[in-house]
Amino acid sequence: QLQLAESGGGLVQAGGSLRLSCEASGRPYSSHVMNWFRQAPGKEREFVAGIRWSNGRTFYADSVQGRFTISKDRAKKTVYLQMNSLKPEDTAVYYCTVATNPGESFGSWGQGTQVTVSS
């Protein structure tokens, strides 16, 4: 089972940008989708974005469409989440996970990385 490690979080002002990274311990299968989720205090974990490892097809939640971009580096076994035009409501712990479909998880989660957007 893949182990995942997120990094890149931090404190940023509204309108700013951050890039998160998720490094996998091994190479994902072609059928896998690498997904980013986030969880704000007192809220359920929600899907943010996903990318299919085989062909790079991307998937986004409506709330981040047009502001966030997910990408991958096959050689580095790493998935990135470029977050632009950040809003205070984007504040959350961000996690990456692997699944067969976007918005799902096999159940293996990294430790997460905190993103805080100040107004």
Image (cartoon, rainbow, N blue to C red):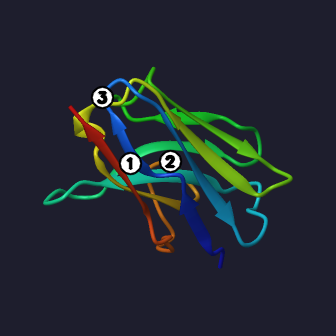
**Can you identify the residue that label 3 sits on?**
14
In the rendered structure, which amino acid carries the disc numbered 3?
Ala
Picture coordinates of residue 54 (x, y %)?
77, 46
Give the mark toward the camera: 3 or 1. 3
Picture coordinates of residue 114 (x, y %)?
38, 57
Quadrant of the image occupied by residue 72: top right
For marks 2 and 3, the one nearer the N-term is 3
**Can you identify the residue that label 1 sits on?**
47
Instruction: Tell me what residue is drawn at x 38 percent, y 35 percent.
Output: 61
**Quadrant for the C terminus in the image:** top left
Please rate how many residues cluster around mark 3, counting C-alpha atoms within 10 Å: few if below 14, some from 14 to 19, many from 20: some
Please rate how many residues cluster around mark 1, counting C-alpha atoms within 10 Å: few if below 14, some from 14 to 19, many from 20: many
For marks 3 and 1, the one nearer the N-term is 3
Quadrant of the image occupied by residue 93: bottom left
Q: Is residue 103 left or right of residue 32?
A: left
Does the CB distance between marks 2 and 1 fall below 8 Å?
Answer: yes
Specify whether residue 4 is in view: yes
Please rate how many residues cluster around mark 2, counting C-alpha atoms within 10 Å: few if below 14, some from 14 to 19, many from 20: many
The secondary element bearing badge 2 is classed as: loop
The secondary element bearing badge 1 is classed as: strand
Instruction: Tell me what residue is drawn at x 28 percent, y 45 percent.
Output: 91
